[in-house]
Image: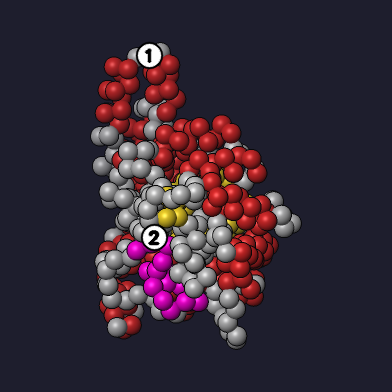
Amino acid sequence: MSYSEAKAKYAALGVDTEAAIEKLLSVPVSLHCWQGDDVIGFDNGGGLTGGIQTTGNYPGRARMPAELMADIDEVLRLVPGRMKLNLHACYAIFSGARADRDALRPEHFAPWAEFAKARGMGLDFNPTFFSHPMVKDNLTLSSPDETVRRFWVEHGKRCVEIAEYFASETGEPCLVNFWIPDGYKDIPADRIGPRERFKKSLDEILSIPYDKDKVFISLESKVFGIGLESYTVGSAEFCLSYAAEKGIVPLMDNGHYHPTEQVADKISSLLLFNPRIALHLTRGVRWDSDHVVLFDDETKEIARELVRCDALGRAFIATDYFDASINRVSAWVTGVRSVKMALLSALLEPSAELKHLQDEADFTALMVRREEQKLLPFGDVWEELLRRAGTPSDYLTEVRNYEREVLQKRI
């Protein structure tokens, strides 16, 4: 079927495919840099800590900034529409003496700012509270060791400063997201103490002045991590309560909840009480396994909620996963394309009619219309979007060529 035929079929349902394509091409998705090098970064040669695990040893991992930037460029060539780049603090680039995380400055990220500006991209940022000697007994901002806690508070402050630098340089707001891995493997004797210290640390970080039109601070919860199965300091209840009290942005990672919880169901509630929300999109298999995002039911339902709530302009959308068992560039492209396909699919939904049927309690028609929608020629609209964006449709061939010409030479 041609695009013109698909356009007519959607028009019969009151859906404007032209408007959907135009809207999707304007919605930025923030690409996580850490897929390209297995979350290793450039400031620490050790392995991952903090309940994080990357599995696999596919050849071609980026080992230095130039390689990571080249791989990101290849991804940008293979995904349509607007993008941002999401960095972790451990990806600082040092031209001279190295600085520890409590002494990071904007100049340590100047190459990333230049990279983003040259590509017309905004930047998002994340403090790195893991994989460092100052993570003591699996605790950072909630540590009872005041030296440890102060070190990480200073790191958080420096990251807010760097986020404002990114926003000033790129002309786009920067989301700086706080997530800590703090917790205990077994049942704790004191649950409130670590959370009191975490709250104190966040209060100290937020006490520094920053431009709230340029920098949006978010807080991300997690249900558990490897070696932290019994207690997580930054629980959903803590993070949502703190974000509400302080007026910062609540961030939901759909891998950071119990497998029976649905992040899509939470979006509408948060939107009623928060001007902005943030999402890290991943795919958990039995647990927070950070598998590559697919065009699956969960991703599509999250996208539907954003569109149905008219919240695409209020949500910071980012990918977050790391798979070292397959070609890393392909992992990036597959995940980002899946997010964008889900958003396009949601934009092509006849939501006004479906809402009307629900309000009229005509659940018979609602079920039938939803099933009929699954047979609509979505793929033809997606192919038209790729054509207009100048993005190759067959990205596997492109990835294989890049692997042969670039990645294999790193072995």
Location of residue 343 in the rendering, given as x and y in whole percent from the top left corner: 41, 43
Q: Earlier in the sequence, mark 1 or mark 2?
A: 2
Residue at the location (29% across, 66% down)?
Answer: 55
Residue 375 lies left or right of residue 163; in this view the side is: left
Q: Classify the position of the N terminus by image quarter.
A: top left
Location of residue 357 in the rendering, given as x and y in whole percent from the top left corner: 38, 18
Q: Which residues are magenta?
A: 36-53
Report the amino acid beneath label 2: Gly
When the figure is inspected, residue 169 is found, relative to residue 385, above or below; the finding is below
- Taking the image as drawn, is residue 3 in sight? no
Report the amino acid beneath label 1: Ala
Q: Is residue 180 magenta?
A: no
Q: Which residue is mark 2?
A: 51
Residue at the location (55% across, 77% down)?
Answer: 93
Seen from the viewer's position, the closer of residues 243 and 354 is 243
Seen from the viewer's position, the closer of residues 365 and 37 is 37
Q: Which residue is mark 1?
A: 361
- Mark seen at residue 15: none
Q: Quadrant of residue 8?
A: top left
Q: Residues within 10 Å of mark 2 (few under 14, many from 20)?
A: some
Location of residue 303 in the rendering, given as x and y in whole percent from the top left corner: 41, 41
Applied colour scheme: secondary structure
